[in-house]
């Protein structure tokens, strides 16, 4: 990763495989400034929604409202950035949590 690179926002439109999406989001979390926005396409796929749900539950990301109906979902990165410890890990199953912000409204 390049030292000093900081983005205000990022857009994810790639793989629909859980671990690929999770890794994309993990590294974007490193690049997008605290309080910045990450927009994710194809959140209707459970694999994508589950990857996003981890960051909602364990890293404090908040849903950012997109005013028009779309398959995109946006999330504001926590400010300050949260780094959860293994002791504070919370389950992030989208079905147990009612879908999370990634799948609500679809």
Image (tube, helix red, strand yellow):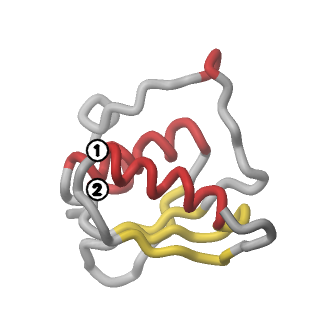
* Mark 2 neighbour density, 10 Å: few (under 14) some (14–19) many (20 or more): few
Q: Earlier in the sequence, mark 2 or mark 1?
A: 1
Rendered view: 67 above or below 93: below
Mark 1 closeness class: few <14, some 14–19, many ≥20 residues within 10 Å = some
Name the mark on residue 11: none
- Left or right: where does residue 5 sit relative to residue 101? right
* Residue 104 badge: 2
Residue nearer the viewer, 100 or 88: 88
Marks 2 & 1, CB-CB < 8 Å contact: yes
Query: Residue at 41% across / 44% down in the picture?
Result: 53
Where residue 76 sits, quadrant-wise, is bottom right
Q: Position of residue 77 (x, y in %)?
A: 62, 59
- Tag 1 secondary structure: loop
Cα–Cα gap, marks 2 and 1: 6 Å
The local secondary structure at tag 2 comes to loop
- Indicate whether 12 appears above or below 63: below
Q: Quadrant of the C terminus?
A: bottom left
Q: Quickly name the residue at label 1.
A: 99
């Amino acid at each position: 990763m390049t030292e000093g690179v900081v983005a205000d926002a990022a857009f994810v439109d790639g793989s629909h495989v859980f671990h690929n999406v999770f890794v994309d989001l993990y590294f974007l979390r490193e690049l997008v400034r605290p309080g910045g926005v990450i927009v994710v396409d194809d959140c209707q796929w459970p694999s994508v929604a589950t990857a996003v749900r981890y960051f909602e539950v364990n890293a404090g990301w908040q849903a950012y409202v997109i005013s028009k109906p779309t398959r995109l979902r946006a999330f504001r990165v926590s400010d300050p950035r949260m780094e959860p410890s293994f002791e504070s890990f919370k389950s992030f199953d989208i079905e147990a949590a009612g879908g999370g912000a990634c799948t609500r409204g679809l």
